[in-house]
Amino acid sequence: MNDNYAGFWLRLVALIIDAIIIGIIQSFVAIPIFAAIGITAVGGMENLDMSDADNVVGLVGAIVAAAGVYWVIATTVQLLYFSFMESSNLQGTVGKMALGLKVTDMQGGKLDLGKAFLRNLCKLISNITMLIGYIMAGFTEKKQALHDMIAGTLVVKK
């Protein structure tokens, strides 16, 4: 087994660093959009008459719509951030670079944008499998998560 592969724990720490960065980026994208459609943190809740069923239904509808909009924004930001960073000459996100990691194809080469996008789109599969797709990186020979196996990629130490 090659000691050059990045294991589960290194990748998790890199992901935590990236999650902080992505959260900040998402805030800058989501807040203006929510403000434009009239959804704010306090959004007039103090004046809401909860005894009126139409108001409650309207509030629930607004919350569901906001959650859907946020999911689309969050997913798009994540896909773009990871795909562009991993296909760049840096070959990794800020979190991966901070830990001395990079993403490669199976031959050790740089990913093109299409392969990086496929890898990150496949993370959605890892998400809906109760994160088992990510945990696989701790148990596979080349420390590959499910999305790495599907896309034919590796995360290695520089």
Image: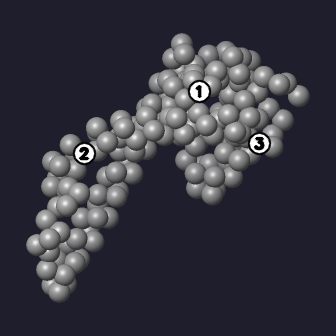
User: Seen in the image, is 128 located left or right of residue 10?
Assistant: left
Q: Which three-letter amino acid code belongs to the residue tagged 2?
A: Ile
Q: Which element is circle 3 on?
A: helix
Q: Residues within 10 Å of mark 2 (few under 14, many from 20)?
A: some
Q: State the residue at coordinates (83%, 25%).
A: 3
Q: Residues within 10 Å of mark 3 (few under 14, many from 20)?
A: some
Q: Quick one: quadrant of the C terminus?
A: top right
Q: Which three-letter amino acid code belongs to the residue tagged 1?
A: Lys
Q: Quadrant of residue 96?
A: top right
Report which residue position mark 3 lands on.
138
Q: Is residue 113 above or below residue 21?
A: above
Report which residue position mark 2 lands on.
31
Residue 112 visible, this orientation = no
Q: Residue furthest top?
A: 89
Q: Quadrant of residue 6?
A: top right
Q: Which element is circle 1 on?
A: helix
For the image, the number of numbered tags is 3
Tell which circle, 2 or 3, labels the residue nearer the N-terminal end: 2
Q: How is the image coloured?
A: one colour
Report which residue position mark 1 lands on.
96
Q: State the residue at coordinates (29%, 58%).
A: 66
Q: Are marks 2 and 3 in contact (CB under 8 Å)?
A: no
Q: Are marks 1 and 2 in contact (CB under 8 Å)?
A: no
Q: State the residue at coordinates (40%, 45%).
A: 74
User: Seen in the image, is 137 located left or right of residue 126?
Assistant: right
From mark 2 to mark 3, how far is it between C-alphas? 37 Å
Residue 152 at x, y = what percent?
Answer: 69, 30
Residue 126 visible, this orientation = yes
